[in-house]
Amino acid sequence: TSSPDKMVPHPGVTVSGLRGSMRQLSGLAESPLKRILGSSEGFRTGHHQSFAMKPGVDRSAPRKFRESVRKGEFKGQTSGSVPGFVQANFVALPREHAYEFLTFCLKNPAPCPLLAVTEPGSTAVEAVAAGADISRDIPRYVIHRDGKPREQLYDVAEYWNKDMVGFLLGCSFSWEDKLASVQLTPKNAQLGVNVSMYNTNIPNHQSGPFKGNMVVSMRPYKPEDIERVAKITEAFPGAHGGPVHWGDPKEIGIDDISRPNYGDAVPIEPEEIPVFWACGVTPQSALRSAELPIAITHAPGHMFITDIKDEELEVLR
């Protein structure tokens, strides 16, 4: 077991290179950060109103993948795994805290787009993943005690008692294939590494003991590509939707872009701008503030893969 991953900077990330890329912001649309910070509380899940899993679709690939995870054959990060199917973040906690966490997700739909909730004591999520066991079908879990990550495990069945409630939340990996199909492949996917994730100063809407700040993922793009990237990802509110910020990382409390808090560092070339999306590691920030005796999450980048096709989450305009 070990504490959550913290990676060393990639040699291609330089502060001077980032300063150079910042000079290219003229002519680019204003970052959505002001709109995000000014938004009021709302209640929304990760499902749009016309969501449905279409009949006649071959969903055997994610089921085979989950079986390989359960058998211990796959233990890695899941970016790029089972292309075309929705990946999900995971949180589990005792029943007495489940309602307030559910409300937290509904109040913070960008970082916590809700896809499924289990019955207390159940590990089944039949509506989104037939035959799955969410206590054994994620490549790596983190056990949190009193708000702090204590250990990482490949199986948490022993912790799943009659009061445990599980939550699945949408993940930005779900639109990475869509970007790749139009030659906008994210840098982490190009390099075959985990996405870069950072703690920020963007406050979450509080529910009971759950508060904290938003965690974001980052993918660098050339300025001329950012508006197209934003439009594509905005069509997936169930996978965090569009960016929450682009440009200067310090505006959202990131002092050193070369040192992500979670995942892997990726190079930001002089002609690129960092683009940030709400991230499903955000509940781990909320868990730190809540200081629950026990909670379980996925390890960053090690997701649950559902039977939902990516396009089934897409909102077409």
Image: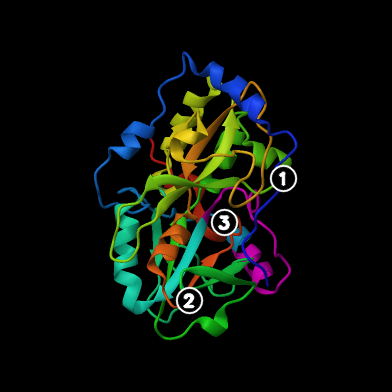
Of residues 177 and 186, which is closer to you in this image? 186
Q: Residue at x 32, y 78 (%)?
A: 96
Q: Is residue 84 above or below residue 134?
A: above
Of residues 61 and 234, which is closer to you in this image? 234
Of residues 83 and 259, which is closer to you in this image? 259
Mark found first going from the N terminus, 1 or 2: 2
Q: Residue at x 67, y 39 (%)?
A: 266
Amino acid at pointer 3: Asp
Q: How far separated are the C-alphas under marks 3 and 1?
A: 26 Å
Q: Residue at x 51, y 66 (%)?
A: 297
Q: Is residue 31 above or below residue 205?
A: above
Q: Specify the quadrant that holds the C terminus.
A: top left
Amino acid at pointer 2: Thr
The residue tagged 1 is 192
Q: Is residue 86 above or below residue 254?
A: below
The residue tagged 2 is 123
Q: Residue at x 45, y 71 (%)?
A: 92
* Residue 175 placement (x, y as % from top left): 53, 42
Mark found first going from the N terminus, 3 or 2: 3
Q: What residue range appears in magenta?
A: 63-87
Residue 243 showing in the rendered view? no
The residue tagged 3 is 58
For residue 185: magenta?
no
Mark found first going from the N terminus, 3 or 1: 3
Residue 275 showing in the rendered view? yes
